[in-house]
Image (tube, helix red, strand yellow):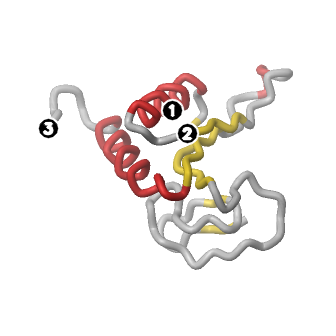
């Protein structure tokens, strides 16, 4: 596990860019089992599958191949909403995905009626 020096997010080792704030990292693989590999980069995490599916559809409509990794345990739904759903994109699409997701996050937190 690794922690971003800029925003404090915790994520898998070997990730070249912080999935939360986009900071470039000097983060080497530590040999642990990870969803990250040399081809894909985690760009977003959320708790709701519908949000992940919506973002996947939007990214793919822009030509960015996207995969969802759902870490929720559907066998025990009453235990709470404490598992993440991660979105992964190809490393070469990471910059475009981060740009879209940063805009999405900004708009998500704007009060209604204050759009550009």
Count the numbered circles shown.
Answer: 3
Q: Which part of the image, by quadrant, shows the N terminus? A: bottom right
For this rendering, which residue is in front, 79 or 22? Answer: 22
* Residue at disc 3, secondary structure: loop
Residue annotated with mark 1:
56
Q: Residue 74: which quarter of the image? A: top right
Q: Is residue 21 left or right of residue 1?
A: left
Alpha carbon separation for disc pair 3 and 2 = 27 Å
Q: Is residue 6 left or right of residue 86?
A: left
Residue 70's x, y, as percent? 70, 34
Callout 2: few (<14), some (14-19), or many (20+) C-alpha neighbours within 10 Å?
Answer: many
Residue annotated with mark 2:
66
Q: Residue 21: which quarter of the image? A: bottom left
Instruction: From this view, report whether residue 44 is shown above or below residue 6.
Output: above
Tell me what residue is drawn at x 14 percent, y 38 percent.
Answer: 116
Disc ID at residue 81 = none
Callout 1: few (<14), some (14-19), or many (20+) C-alpha neighbours within 10 Å?
Answer: many
Tell me what residue is drawn at x 53 percent, y 56 percent.
Answer: 19
Residue annotated with mark 3:
116
Q: Residue 72: which quarter of the image? A: top right
Instruction: From this view, report whether residue 102 is shown above or below residue 70.
Output: below
* Residue at disc 1, secondary structure: helix
* Residue at disc 2, secondary structure: strand
Earlier sequence position, callout 3 versus callout 2: 2
Residue 80's x, y, as percent? 73, 28
Earlier sequence position, callout 3 versus callout 1: 1
Answer yes or no: do the residues labelled 2 and 1 have beta carbons within 8 Å? Answer: yes
Alpha carbon separation for disc pair 3 and 1 = 23 Å
Q: Please, which residue is most extreme toward the bottom here?
A: 26
Q: Is residue 54 left or right of residue 31?
A: left
């Amino acid at each position: 596990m690794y922690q971003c020096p800029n925003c404090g997010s915790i994520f898998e080792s070997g990730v070249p860019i912080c999935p939360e704030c986009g900071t470039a990292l000097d983060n080497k693989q530590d040999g642990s089992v990870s969803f990250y590999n040399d081809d894909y980069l985690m760009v977003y995490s959320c708790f709701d599958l519908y949000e992940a599916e919506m973002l996947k559809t939007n990214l793919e409509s822009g030509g960015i191949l996207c995969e969802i990794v759902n870490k929720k345990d559907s066998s025990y739904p009453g235990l709470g909403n404490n598992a993440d759903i991660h979105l992964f994109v190809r490393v070469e699409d990471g910059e475009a995905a981060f740009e879209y997701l940063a805009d999405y996050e900004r708009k998500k937190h704007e009060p209604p009626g204050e759009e550009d």
